[in-house]
Amino acid sequence: MAQSLLKRGFGMIKEQEGTEARTARRRDFLKLAGTGVAGGAAATAAAVIGPAEAAIERAPAQGYRETEHVRKAYQLARF
Amino acid sequence: MLAAARADERTVPAEDEVRAQHYQLLARFLAAPPDAALLQLSAGLGGNETELGTAVGELARRARETPVEVASREYHDLFIGLARGELVPYASYYLTGFLNEKPLAKLRVDMSRLGIARAAEVKEPEDHVAALCEMMAGLILGWFRPPLDLVGQRAFFDAHLRAWVGRFFEDLEAAASARLYRPLGTLGRTFVTIEEAAFDMV
């Protein structure tokens, strides 16, 4: 990542190596744990699902979709 | 917004992109009744011999054999109900027994700090499990601001998900109405355990 390259330029190679080793260990762990099993299909799902489905928005928000569960929660909150 | 989000996503490491996909998949199932497109996509997911992979495979199998109307009814029984659904998937409810409590207030502070918001005209709580999964995906992929680093992701996860989402997914696995959603509960519970362990390596 661009950020780690910048840090390297400022003589923080040793610290970076530690970070990279940790990153590698974490990456290996995630692979072993089976994340990514869904492979290409999950990527497709994510593309379809995307930010457009989100009930949240980048601020300032353009529109908050009032979904059914949210309406129900609103009712519950009045009890 | 989408173009900007795509540009940011290119700088996200592959393993984190995959984590975001898991969050998005969970969010999509939990935010609204599954539509035909979601069921079709889920039916195509491949499993493997890991615990997570087994859950994905089982979800795919059930997605293949569940008609949209049946999936929709199941969603209603689980989360909407007549008086209320079998489960109430909000952080405030899980942590305090009531909706709109302090966990929601704390979440709103962090959302505003991280550039996440909802429209002014709507007043529903943001601490729904689907919204939190969407926020995790968005923070990883950089939907709101440039992608958040792992330390920042861990802080958000620890503050708003860690104390209760595992319990929620266990409840989903055990819910009487859950058929299609049972493996989704297993998937969620397993994935959250992996997230916790991976964050401990950061």
Image (spheres, helix red, strand yellow):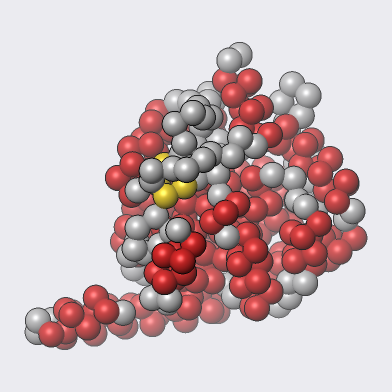
Number of marks present in the image shown: 0
Q: Residue at x 75, y 66 (%)?
A: B41
The foreground one among B165 and A73 is A73
- Rendering coords of residue B102 (x, y %): 40, 28
- Rendering coords of residue A41 (x, y %): 69, 74
Q: Residue at x 81, y 44 (%)?
A: B72
Quadrant where the N terminus of chain A sits is bottom left
Quarter of the figure with residue A70? top right
- Rendering coords of residue B200 (x, y %): 38, 64
Residue A44 falls left or right of residue A33: right
The extreme left residue here reads A11
Quadrant where the C terminus of chain A sits is top right
Residue B53 falls left or right of residue B22: right
Q: Residue at x 24, y 75 (%)?
A: A3
Residue B170 in sight from this viewpoint: no
Vertical side of A53 occupied by A29: above or below: below
- Rendering coords of residue B23 (x, y %): 56, 59
The foreground one among A15 and B140 is B140
Residue A27 falls left or right of residue B168: left
Vertical side of B19 occupied by B48: above or below: below
The extreme top residue here reads A79
Residue B16 in sight from this viewpoint: yes
Q: Residue at x 78, y 24 (%)?
A: B82
Vertical side of B191 occupied by B45: above or below: below
